[in-house]
Image: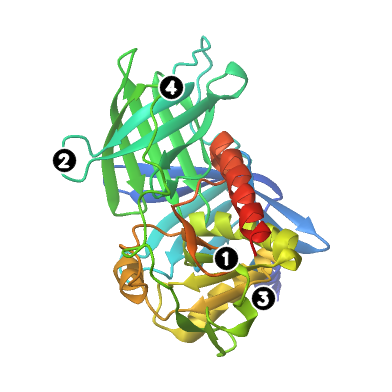
Amino acid sequence: MLKLASVLIFITTLSFAQPKLGIWRGVLSLNPEKQIELPFNFEIKKLKGKHQLIIRNAQEQIVVDEIKLKKDSFNFKMPIFDTEFRTKLIGDSILTGLWINHTKKENNTIAFTAKAGDSKRFPYVPGKPNTFYEGKWEVTFSPGTADSSKAIGMFTHANGSAYVYGTFLTETGDYRYLDGMMHNGKLYLSCFDGSHAFLFIAENNGTEITKGDFYSGSTWHENWIGKRNDKFELHDPESLTYLKNPNAEINFTFYNTKNEKISLSDPKYKNKAVIVQIMGSWCPNCMDESAYLSKVYKQYNKQGLEIIALAYERTSDAERAKTNLTRLTKRFDIGYDILLTGLTGKDKASESLPFLNGVMAFPTTIFLDANHVVKSVYTGFSGPATGKAYEDYTVKTEKLIGELLSKK
């Protein structure tokens, strides 16, 4: 009887396993052989009796509330993006399991562990303050190769300390909120937002970044270098994508999530200025733009502005695509139409919108006046992590919207 009672107590304990509340340090094992690990911090808390997980990347806080806790399983689905964690809870302070990315057909799982009570994203040994990485950098990815590309690195040492946050601006978007530190002269930055799993490491010679490594997920690695350059600029994002024929009339027809056929030529959009957002629910830059455009729509819709999003999802399953887009819509309270194109990738997007010279980035945004004449095509999106670049974009965009509405 005593042995049976012990077993029942053990089973009861498993049934009511609870993760420790507070700060945790999670680690994604990108390359176990080379011991390449991507760390990030999150907090587990309870709200009205239900568990909530908050992932932190610099100034960003991502609230995760789709959590299932059963016996020793602690599983949670990332908001917006079609990814999830399936883990086992060991005691109350250890999680071990997998991060699963459902938008990928291959190499879609990465080993994950987490420990409660550890707030250090990267190892840190206190020393003399050094703000070497502070400022604006001209960055070259894949230097000396045919795939070489430029970016702007923008880094800030928090209060002049070893802790660093920042991002990279490219011609197709930004790398969102990167968080890390300078340690023994090296720069360590990481980001995990449910889609991006980014790790950056850099070394310097006292003047320039001479050796940089960029890891994305379990398969991507790229070298990079950088030099300080306050005057460096990327190409104008309004010059990269354009109409093949400047006088061409544009139109398209796709179905919304309610299986209703929607065309730009529908009466709803007649004599209305229209923003066409080329996007996907899997795309973090599109997420940032959708959050912004949702606010724009609420502000300007009654004045005659309409927005149509064309979704190029990474799944051929129409129902899964609808589910992903519905989650995005609810998350940002999006009031404008989102259409399922049923197509995937930039090549298919280019084929479906033949009036453009091509689609080189998600998002790409087309601004039309009330006669549906194209006034601007903007490639990529500089989100809130870019600071002033984001502020400049919103000011410029809303000025353009004002001009489009005033010429109805």
Q: State the residue position of label 2.
A: 145
**Contact? badges 1 and 2 (CB < 8 Å):** no
Residue in view at x 49 percent, y 13 percent: 130
Compute the Cα span from label 3 to label 4.
72 Å
Compute the Cα span from label 2 to label 3.
67 Å
The label number, if any, that marks residue 4 in the structure image: 3
- Measuring from the top left, give residue 230's x and y in whole percent: 43, 22
**Contact? badges 2 and 4 (CB < 8 Å):** no
Disc number lying in front (2 or 3): 2
Disc number lying in front (3 or 4): 4
Q: State the residue position of label 4.
A: 230
Q: Is the residue 245 above or below the residue 386 in the image?
A: below
SS for dot 4:
loop
- Measuring from the top left, give residue 348's x and y in whole percent: 32, 73
Residue in view at x 34 percent, y 58 percent: 360
**Residue type highlighted by circle 4:** Asp
